[in-house]
Amino acid sequence: MESLCNLESVFPLCDILPPCSALIGLAFSGSIGMTFLVLACALPQYSNWWPFFMVAFYLLAPFPVVISRRYGDGTGNTNPCREIAMFITAVIVVSAFGLPIILARAPELTPVIMWGSAGLVITANIIVFLTILGFFIAFDNDDVDYSMW
């Protein structure tokens, strides 16, 4: 007797479900990180949009690695291009964590942002940078269509 719940006949695209579900999970976690960033700016007790400049760090962080992969030799071994790209990415990530702390401390009498806002920005940084790392881990191989760019 055949099973009434034969998913392969109903969903012929089940082969792409794992990469698709990984992409959905990464989109969900990225949106949670951006929600924390918007909360750090828009809550009435903070009401300051200076922390939103973190988006520039989020956009710049993957570029050195993407460029080094594009112009690398593709063997997986380390080379100077990949090492410099990792260093530049690390500088961008550390700067993204340092900027809200600097904004919360300076000037001393009236800081640019409050410490609660800085905490929300650092939480957003953790989530968004882990999402970017998750993208590079999940779509590292050439079999997945999302790694073609």
Image (tube, rainbow, N blue to C red):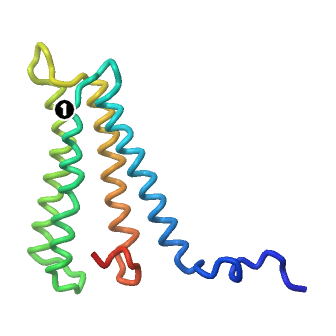
Q: From the image, which quarter does the C terminus lie in? A: bottom left
Query: Which is more toward the observer, 72 or 144?
Result: 144
Q: Position of residue 63 (x, y in %)?
A: 18, 64
Query: Which is more toward the observer, 38 or 96?
Result: 38
Q: Quadrant of the rendered structure where residue 132 is?
A: bottom left
Residue at 22 percent across and 34 percent down: it is 51
Q: From the image, which quarter does the N terminus lie in? A: bottom right
Q: Which secondary structure lies at badge 1?
A: helix
As drawn, 75 above or below 38: below
Q: Quadrant of the rendered structure where residue 12 is?
A: bottom right
Residue at 49 percent across and 69 percent down: it is 20
- How busy is the neighbourhood of tag 1: few (under 14 within 10 Å), some, or many (20 plus)? few
Instruction: State left or right for residue 127 relative to residue 64.
Output: right
Query: Which is more toward the observer, 11 or 46?
Result: 11
Amino acid type, mark 1 = Trp
As drawn, 40 above or below 35: above
Q: Position of residue 14 (x, y in %)?
A: 60, 78
Q: Position of residue 35 (x, y in %)?
A: 38, 40
Total numbered circles: 1
Q: Position of residue 41 (x, y in %)?
A: 29, 30
- In the rendered image, which residue does mark 1 sit on? 50
As drawn, 109 above or below 56: above
Residue at 84 percent across and 80 percent down: it is 3
Task: Name the residue at the top extreme.
Answer: 109
